[in-house]
Image (cartoon, rainbow, N blue to C red):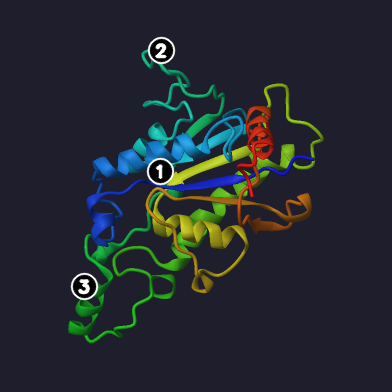
Amino acid sequence: MTTPRCFIVRHGETEWSLSGKHTGSTDIPLTANGEKRVRATGKALVGDDRLIVPKQIKHIYVSPMHRAQRTLELLNLGCTLPYSTSNSQNPNPPPHIKATVTVTPKIREWDYGDYEGITSSEIRSLRAQQSLPGTWDIWTDGCPNGESPSDVIKRVDELIHEIREEHHRPYMGSKEPDADGCTGDVVVVAHGHILRAFAMRWVRQDLSATALIMEAGGVGTLSYEHKRLEEPAILLGGGFVVGPDVLSEVDEEEREGKLK
C-alpha cells in the first residue's frame, strides 16, 4: 500500500552557512565543497534502488534563492535550470523524472530582518547593547524587522496543506504506483531554519518545541503513520528498495563468508 513521502533537502554549504551567519535574503552561491557534497548526496540517495526514486516523485518545490535551486540541479534528479526534465548535453543523463517543479516563496528562508548576515553570538551581543534579553530564540522571538514565528507558520502551513491535498491524498493507500511508477512523493529544497519549521509543522507541533537540526546538504524524510493522512510523522531512517543486483552481491558475499 502506498504511503507518499515528503523529502526535505537543505541547500549545500555556503560561506555564510560555514561561518554561522544567518542567511535569508542574501543570495550567495554554494562553495566548491558544498557543490561536491550535494553531488555525492545525489549519487548516494537518488536512484531506482535508493531512498529517493525519481519515477516515484510527483512534484518538487524549491525556494527562489539560487543556492537552493543550484542544490536541486546537482541532486541527480534530472532537474536542470530552468528545470527541463532532461539534459541532452549530459553524457551520463540522470534518472528519468516526470515531476513538475514549483519555485515558491512559501519555502524561502526565514526573513532575519535586522539579524541578516550576523551570527547567533553577535545577535546576543547586539541585544545586550539594546537592553534586550540576551537569551534570544528565533522559535519564540522571531527577528526584528523580519518574520515572527506566526508569519513563518502561516506560509509553511499553507504549503503543507497544498502538498497533502494536491499530491499526497490522491495516492494515499493506493495498492500500486500509477502507470508511470509514481507514488506521490514530493521533494522540498530550501534552507535550514525554514525546513526545521516545516518539519515541526508537518507533525503539528509549535515551533518552540523544536529540537531538530539539519546540516547543509542534509536530507530528511516526512511521511505518515498507519498509512493515514491524518497521522503525519517524521520518518526516522528511510525505507528504500534493495534491487536484485544488490541482493545478489549480498548473497555472494555471504557465500564467500565476507559478511559476519
For disc 1, the neighbor class at 10 Å (few under 14, some 14 to 19, many from 20) is: many
Of callouts 3 and 1, the N-terminal one: 1
Say which residue label 3 marks. Answer: 122
Viewer-side residue, 25 vs 192? 192
32, above or below 229, in the image: above
x, y percent for residue 180:
67, 22
Q: Secondary structure at mark 2?
A: loop
Q: CA distance from mark 2 to mark 3?
A: 47 Å
Residue occupying image coordinates x 72% and y 22% = 179
Say which residue label 2 marks. Answer: 88
198 vs 75, left or right, is right
Q: CA distance from mark 3 to mark 1?
A: 27 Å
Q: CA distance from mark 1 to mark 2?
A: 25 Å
Which mark, by number, is residue 104? none
175 vs 218, left or right, is right
Residue 99, image quadrant: top right
Say which residue label 1 marks. Answer: 63
Q: Secondary structure at mark 3?
A: helix
Residue occupying image coordinates x 55% and y 70% = 206
62 vs 176, left or right, is left
For disc 3, the neighbor class at 10 Å (few under 14, some 14 to 19, many from 20) is: few
Of callouts 2 and 3, the N-terminal one: 2
